[in-house]
Amino acid sequence: MTTLETVTKEIVDLHDFFTEWFNGTAQRDQLEPRFLSHLHEDVQFIPPEGQVMTGSVLKEGFGRGYGSNPDFRIQIRDVDVRYERGNLVLATYTEWQTGAALSSEANNARVTTVLVEMTNPVTWLHIQETWLPDAVRNAGSFDF
């Protein structure tokens, strides 16, 4: 597989798990192997609102979020490898969410930049999300 194919699969698989987790359809014992094991111990996640979250905060939040949003769905679009050096890959993608109970907009979209290490499994080092402009979101489809 190419780097783009590997990164795309990783991103889509992880977000499919998020949907299953928040819908309550994933097995509870899958949190570690399907998500937490992919996070570097020093991972940082910055959601669109701007607060910096550590891996431990992410883990706690996900633990509490199981089954909390049965109508939640995610679709990943526009994955692009922006930079590659050794085992490190900087990638971007858009994440479209519908039924997002905890977001200001139930239908929302964001562009995400990630730094990952191409290990097995892929290791997420840094995640930064930014809201897509209203005009882009409004022109997009939430029919998924």
Image: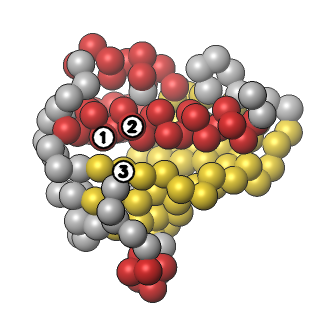
Contact between labelled residues 1 and 2, with CB atoms less than 8 Å apart: yes
Q: Mark 2 points at which residue?
A: 16
Where 100 falls versus 67 (above or below)? Answer: below
Where 134 falls versus 85 (above or below)? Answer: below
Kind of residue indicated by mark 2: Asp
Which numbered disc, 1 or 3, marks the residue that appears first in the sequence? 1
Between the residue at mark 1 and the residue at mark 3, the CA separation in whole angstroms equals 6 Å
Residue nearest the observer in this picture, 61 or 98:
98
**Residue 3 is drawn in which quadrant?**
top right
Kind of residue indicated by mark 3: Ile
Kind of residue indicated by mark 1: Thr
Residue nearest the observer in this picture, 99 or 54:
99
Q: Quadrant of the C terminus?
A: bottom left
**Residue 25 is drawn in which quadrant?**
top left
Residue at 80% over, 49% down: 83
Contact between labelled residues 3 and 1, with CB atoms less than 8 Å apart: yes
